[in-house]
Amino acid sequence: MARTRILDPTAAPPATDADPGPDAGDLAGRRVGLRFDSAWRSWLWVLDEWEPRFIAAGAQIERWSAGNRIGEGGEQTFAALDTFATDVDLALIGLGN
């Protein structure tokens, strides 16, 4: 009887860096920016979980919805992003998933 060899087409998982990055420090009185977009509606659920925790820690929240990335809408989005980045002390802009 012939033997069959099955190859696994999946790639090895990427190397990860377990370092969470710098500590944000005390959040009381600081402006925390929460970025979201309409392309991934689950962002709103995530923000509904995170926002009360930041508020409980004494932070002020600034939500920012990322818009289009191209054309006239893109120009407006990047201008609004500059303002958002300037107005907050720290920001949650991605989930790393």
Image (tube, rainbow, N blue to C red):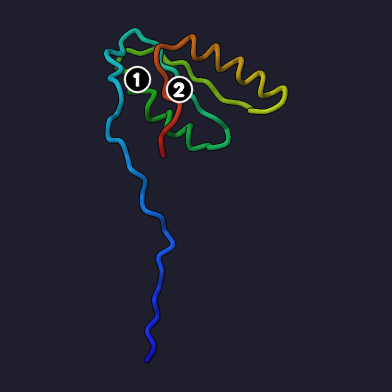
Residue 96 sits above or below residue 12 on the image: above
* Residue identified by numbered label 1: 54
Asked whether disc 1 touches disc 2, contact meaning CB atoms under 8 Å apart, the reply is: yes
* Residue identified by numbered label 2: 34
Q: Choose between 51 and 3: the one closer to the eye.
A: 3
Question: Quick one: which residue is furthest to the right in this view?
Answer: 72
Question: Quick one: which residue is furthest to the bottom in this view?
Answer: 1
Helix, strand or loop for disc 1: helix
Helix, strand or loop for disc 2: strand
Residue drawn at x 69%, y 23% as measured from the top left:
73
Q: Choose between 53 and 3: the one closer to the eye.
A: 3
Residue drawn at x 33%, y 43% as measured from the top left:
15
Residue flagged by tag 1: what amino acid is it? Phe
Q: Does residue 79 appear left or right of residue 85 in this picture?
A: right
Q: Choose between 95 and 29: the one closer to the eye.
A: 95
Q: Does residue 55 appear left or right of residue 72 in this picture?
A: left
Residue flagged by tag 2: what amino acid is it? Leu
Residue 97 sits above or below residue 10 on the image: above
Residue drawn at x 48%, y 37% as measured from the top left:
42
Q: Quadrant of residue 88?
A: top left
Residue drawn at x 45%, y 22% as measured from the top left:
34
Q: Pinpoint residue 33: horizontal percent, then vertical percent.
A: 44, 18
Q: Pinpoint residue 83: horizontal percent, then vertical percent.
A: 55, 11
